[in-house]
Amino acid sequence: MTLRFVVLTGGPGGGKTTLKEELLHDPAWHHRVAALPEAISLTRGLGVSPAEPRFQRLMVALQMALEDALRRALADSSPRLVLCRRGSLDPLAYWLAYGWTEGGFFACTVTTRQEHYSRYDAVIHLVTAAEGALHAYRRYPAAHRGETPQEAVHLDRLLRRVWGGHLRYVLIDNSGRDWSARSAAVRQALEQCWREALD
């Protein structure tokens, strides 16, 4: 299989968008990656509130549909790493943040944790800047996110709980690392996936 699907996850302000843009504009990487749009961008105008359980069911369905469409469209293409800015299990973290049960999530979405895990070749978790690099954390209006640093850290930890059991889960924290070092760590993880895509 020449396509390798990689989740970029983590709490708000972790650098997912920055990383994706860097890779798409880097001559060494832009021909090796494809980037899916974030599923939540497709929910505007649908009239479903994030405070409703069915919103997370919608997010799962949209994410899976985007990935499956790309799998079909690029099935005979040259090798690519498909970057998913959030994966189909990220909605579980938001579900849990509302205080709903994990079992309720899998019942509502008619999925299993293993089904979600098996969709991805790797999960790269960029820890929010709110944990370990607070000076770099930006909120609205400086950035398009409304979460307080405390809320960002809470979501980040829920995402660790959600994805931590994946066989290739890579956590990129802020301990003693500036953005350049974190970006380099992600590229190292992606390089391994790229070699496998060529096999």
Image (cartoon, rainbow, N blue to C red):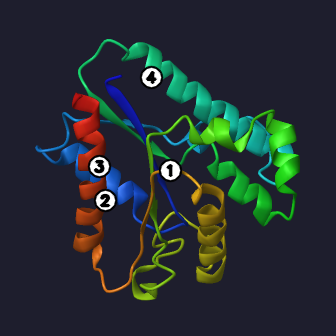
CA–CA distance between discs 1 and 2? 16 Å
Rounded to the nearest angstrom, the CA distance separating label 3 from label 2 is 6 Å
Kindly identify which numbered label has been placed on residue 167.
1
| Number of dots carrying numbers | 4
Q: SS at mark 3? A: helix
Tell me, yes or no, whether the two marked residues, 1 and 2, touch with CB atoms within 8 Å. no
Q: Is residue 127 left or right of residue 4?
A: right
Marked residue nearer the N-terminal end (4 or 1): 4
Look at mark 3 in the image and give the residue it sits on.
Answer: 190
- Name the residue type under label 4: Leu
The spot of residue 95 in percent (x, y) is 78, 56
Q: Which residue is mark 4?
A: 70
- Whole-angstrom CA distance, mark 1 to mark 3, is 15 Å
SS class, disc 4: helix
Please report whichever mark, 1 or 3, sits nearer to the chain's N-terminal start: 1
Q: Of marks 1 and 2, which one's residue comes earlier in the chain?
A: 1
Q: Nearer the viewer, residue 79 or 142?
A: 79
- Choose mark 4 or mark 1, whichever is in front: 1
- Asked whether residue 147 is in view, the answer is no
Q: Residue at x 59, y 65 (%)?
A: 160
The answer to which image quadrant residue 159 occupies is bottom right
